[in-house]
Amino acid sequence: MSFTEKDLKQIKDRNSDLLTIQNQIENFKTGFPFINAVKAATIGDGIIRLPEEELNNYIRLFDAQAPKKSLVKFVPASGAASRMFKALYAAKEEGKTDKSVEQFDKEIGKFAFYSSLSRHLQEHSLQHKLEALLGKNGLDYGNLPKGLLEFHLYPDGARTALEEHLVEGALYANNKGKVRLHFTVSPEHKRKFKALINQVKSRYEEKFGVKYNITFSEQKPSTDTIAVDLENNPFRDGSGKLLFRPAGHGALLENLDDIKADVIFIKNIDNVVPDHLKEETIRYKKALAGLLLDYQKKIFYFIKRLEKPDPSVFMINKAARFLKNELNVDPPKGFRLWPAEEKLKFVLAKLKRPLRVCGMVKNVGEPGGGPFWVANEDGSVSLQVVESAQFDMANKKQKAIFENATHFNPVDLICSFRDHRKEYYPLPGFRDDKTGFITEKSQSGKTLKAQELPGLWNGAMADWNTLFVEVPLITFNPVKTVNDLLRKEHQPE
């Protein structure tokens, strides 16, 4: 694939890598392979269920260790909330109404944002309500990110999703009164995020007796992927320039890689609940973090002993059993017959990886990823969070494995990518680049193909050490449509 001098300058100006772009074009030509799932992860077979006593022990462990650790709450918060209001836009612009629109109209007074909305209402027709909610002369909610929308109502007023994360941060990401939060935001929304933080920060600091350190980052333009036409040639805009598109949430791996902390809590911006339902969320966040620290200590124990001169065969085999029985990495067939040197090399490579503990809820039919045992290129089998699009549904065996999944990934992760020397693993080196996605889009009336990088908690973390833990369904309350805010989980006590 040849590029003009103008193309090369455009690529350089974006801080993009020419070889990476050429690889992306090759991906369009060859496509991405499906994963090879071995079986669904289930309770006792890849998913841990914590008895109450064990849960409390991990909570105590985390509470004891938290003052000695640097903690960060990492919240992907990019993009406008327009999809939340899809049905309302259809009613506003095309006059199409359905049951969800009727429910919105009937129960509009129950929304936390109703007080703010009412200031824009001069009449009470449905069209006027929709214009006040979505229009630029009203709340303009369709063009705001979810983090800035008023989600929950309290006696002292409404609270946005962003504010709920400030509260959560104070309750489990608190290191001796200091709370670090990091939000990934879109450039066009950054100013409004900062304005809201400046408006409410001191109130929550006083309420919880903490000091917040809140930072923001944007998806890096260098992570955008090149678009191609249907013949896999670079797509060009009206001025002849190459077209690059945002590469999905997998691009945020670069943002996560910039975070320096011992423990990182990851949770989507819209998965929050009012205060009266937060207890289980807080308990399980702490327990999962305690579990992470416990396993990290065990991993470091083995690494340090295996790095000593001439480690014993006994220690190598003991580490291999730990890898299989506790870290869920099943070595390739014939591993038992490998020479000690080869075993040592394999075990050390698998131990020296970032670590994540992922909360899993029982499957209730939500779209998205789930926990599976997956065969890797090196012949090993390990735990992965896999999206439905990564499965070959034409393969009856693979389709059956997908349908046998008992649990679902609610994006509830606690991570650490510090090694035993307190240095940081470079996260892009642990991504499976063969787990991207190709989709069809349009630009100026022309069809194009776009490419998404491996998802942040899917292929981007494919080569991490992974533990799955069942968490209560009450900890998973995403807001996909505006009417989700009418569910009891988002209503006042």
Image (cartoon, rainbow, N blue to C red):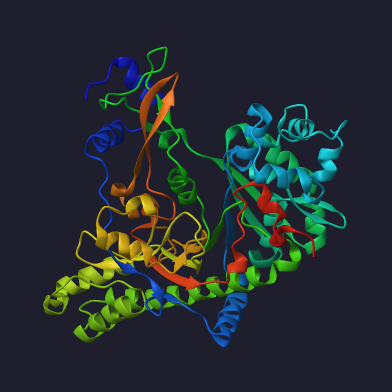
Number of numbered discs: 0
In which quadrant of the rendered view does residue 137 lie?
top right
In which quadrant of the rendered view does residue 271 lie?
bottom right
Position of residue 116 measured from the top left corner of the image (x, y, whole percent): 83, 41
The answer to whether 314 appears left or right of 65 in the picture is: left
The answer to whether 310 appears left or right of 305 in the picture is: left
The quarter of the picture where the N terminus appears is top left
Residue 224 visible in the snapshot: yes
Residue at image coords 28%, 16%: 4
Find the residue positioned furthest to the top.
Answer: 239
256 above or below 127?
Answer: below
Residue at image coords 49%, 79%: 49
Residue at image coords 21%, 69%: 345
The answer to whether 92 appears left or right of 319 in the picture is: right
Pick the front one: 114 or 189 = 114
Pick the front one: 352 or 265 = 265
The quarter of the picture where the C terminus appears is bottom right
381 above or below 212?
Answer: below
Position of residue 384 measured from the top left corner of the image (x, y, whole percent): 36, 62
Position of residue 459 measured from the top left corner of the image (x, y, whole percent): 36, 53
Position of residue 85 measured from the top left corner of the image (x, y, whole percent): 64, 40
Residue 420 visible in the snapshot: no
In which quadrant of the rendered view does residue 423 lie?
bottom left
